[in-house]
Amino acid sequence: MPGKSPIYLDNAATSWPKPPAVALAIADALEQGIGSPGRGAHSRAINSSRTLTSLRESLAKLVNLQVTDRVILTSGSTEACNLALQGLFTNLGSADPKPVVICSVLEHNAVMRPLNWLQKQGLIELRLVDINNQDIVTEHQLTPLLDDRVRLVAVTHASNVTGMIQPIKALAEALKQSCPDAIFFVDASQTIGLVELAMDWGIDLIAFSGHKSLLGPPGIGALCIGQRAVGQMPSDNDPLQPTRFGGVGFDSFDPIAPATLPMRFEPGTPNTLGAAGLLASLQARTADHAIATLAHERALVGMLMDALKDDDRFEILSPSGIDQRVGLISLRIRAMDPHQVASILDASFSILVRAGLHCAPQAHRTLEKTMTPRGAVRISPGPGTTADEMQTCIDSLRLIADSC
């Protein structure tokens, strides 16, 4: 009831609570004083540079990227996606025929909107690849869309609506066989640090945020770049080009952007506080963190699914079990607007969830089989969520359904 500690079930948007080390690292950076990395020879600037270097090293290990300078720090997934997608195409000018980009129907607007904008500017032709009856994009859906005009394939590692994990290895192999020169981009926002993902599977670009499963603060993320997207010596002939320009602390006579990575893609003063917080979270992780957390969150989602799957008052989007999904589930009470459900959960039961289209309208159109989808209530437990809290959520949903 109102006044008690809330049950937080919106970890797919941003995780909570954060490890205590995150706040301590940010506070320590503020109290001890931070410098601007790469923009001074004094101790504070040097220490800030070390923080960024250590963070790059930790993030590179998550995706088996050997060259840490190719970890480009961003403000989050949205900036990382925009850098990848716009950086590949905005420098092309008009071309006929246009290069083709393929993306899945599951993509977040951080991917769909840049691609739709590029298509509206006449820079690309966009093709959507559908999902099968298990809500998965397979090589059988992808291969018929591949031809010699395809320059990029973009697929989320796990949908932020269904939670279903996509077969990235198989898709990478299909792309390699049919379009060996095409770039493969993966949005790992819902999976980074939980589900195995490696650049050497044939992935060229991986984007993610630090504030979800990595348990870091908001405002920090990364784009990991493979060698095919930017060569050993970055140049204006590489597929990926900068999309923002400004000071980087050196090579100030260069009129556009220096070739040196990672600064080529990181103009301006970086978010050192966010970097310190994310680094602290990564350093606090145990060796079995990913396995234990994924199993725990899947079990809680399975608990909810088992409780409601045979109740006709509820509709579960993607009722495909728990073994191939991350810890989130989207559902609807058939007789009630999803936003109303979420509002009642908050106001009457102190349960915090996410309602709506989850910034993935095409996913909802596909799953709901309508151009004007209603959206859904998304429930996403975290590593600290208990079985008792999930049972409270189940009981509350049933009470709300009883009132319809």
Image (cartoon, rainbow, N blue to C red):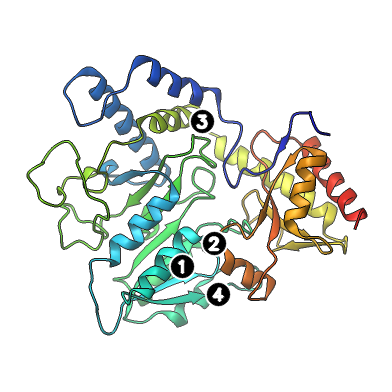
- Label 1 environment density (alpha carbons within 10 Å; few <14, some 14–19, many ≥20): many
Above or below for 260 versus 48:
below
* Lower position in the chain sequence, tag 4 or tag 3: 4
Residue 285 disc label: 3
Helix, strand or loop for disc 1:
helix
Name the residue type under label 4. Answer: Asp
**Where is residue 62 shown, x and y percent of the image?**
42, 42
Q: Is residue 136 visible?
A: no
**What residue appears at the point 26 percent right and 20 percent down from the top-left corner?**
44
Q: Which residue is mark 2?
A: 166
Tag 2 near tag 3, CB within 8 Å? no
Q: Which residue is mark 1?
A: 171
C-alpha separation, residue under disc 4 versus residue under disc 3: 36 Å
In the rendered view of the protein, which quadrant contains the N terminus?
top right
Classify residue 278 by image quadrant: top left
Name the residue type under label 3. Answer: Arg
Tag 2 near tag 1, CB within 8 Å? yes
Q: Which residue is mark 4?
A: 130
**Where is residue 148 shown, x and y percent of the image?**
31, 81
- Label 3 environment density (alpha carbons within 10 Å; few <14, some 14–19, many ≥20): some
* Lower position in the chain sequence, tag 2 or tag 3: 2
Of residues 344 and 399, the one drawn nearer to the viewer in this rendering: 344
C-alpha separation, residue under disc 4 versus residue under disc 2: 12 Å
